[in-house]
Amino acid sequence: PLAVAVLLALLGGAFLLYRDLGAPHRPDEPIADVMPEFRQMRVLVDPRKGLDSRPATKPILVRHLLTHTAGFTYAFNQGLLEDEYKRVGLQPMSSGALLQQGAPAPDLTGYMQRLATLPLAAEPGSKWQYSISLDVAGALLERLTGKTLDRVFAEQLFEPLGMKDTGSDADNGGHDIVTGYANFPGGLAPQPN
């Protein structure tokens, strides 16, 4: 739903509402206009040999987030940068397996601040790689709207489509809802609400 929400915001003009604040309102605008922590990104020189980095020559664009070409990676991939993601707690926000059972999900603001301290795996726009870029797109939407991501989803997607039993904390309204499970360190268990 995140990519759809971002696209609806772009196409429906929601980003235009924030243009006067310097916010991106087209897919080819830098995310650093709203998320300044991503303004001075660095890129690994050789991801296989170490964490030495150089300044990025291009900014991360909204388009890069939606196409997994922003230069980010996932902590569950193999490599030195991925080990750094793990060390600073940059697990995918959607992965309940990476939360302590019963603990709340980390907030996107702190998550983005930690992410911006690490180099990119590749120059923005130069390489496709599944990554946490949609997590960054979610944080971008939160900052643009001043609302939590679950409210953005509800208002832009779920409520207009009549999806009453869909959301981050859906009320079952007397209907059966599937319990999400994740592979926690102690084994398979229901995901925390």
Image: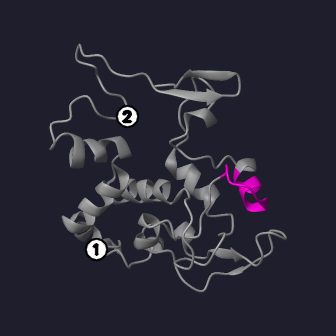
User: Disc 1 versus disc 2: distance between alpha carbons?
Assistant: 29 Å
Give the residue at mark 1.
19
What amino acid is at disc 2?
Answer: Ser
Furthest toward the top, the residue is 174
Q: How many marks?
A: 2
Task: Note whether 140 is above or below 64 in the view shown.
Answer: above
Q: Secondary structure at mark 2?
A: loop
Nearest the viewer among 137 and 22 is 137
Instruction: Provide residue 131's location: percent of width, then percent of height.
Output: 56, 58
Q: Is residue 172 magenta?
A: no
Instruction: Provide residue 75's location: percent of width, then percent of height.
Output: 67, 51
Is any part of residue 148 visible from this angle? no
Left or right: where 171 falls relative to 13: right
When asked about the image quadrant of residue 74, the answer is bottom right
Foreground: disc 1 or disc 2 = 2
- The boundaries of the magenta stretch are 75-85
Q: Residues within 10 Å of mark 1 (few under 14, many from 20)?
A: some
Q: Residue at x 23, y 41 (%)?
A: 158
What amino acid is at disc 1?
Answer: Arg
Instruction: Provide residue 113's location: percent of width, then percent of height.
Output: 59, 57
When asked about the image quadrant of residue 18, the answer is bottom left
Left or right: where 128 falls relative to 172: right
Left or right: where 61 falls relative to 170: right
Give the residue at mark 2.
168
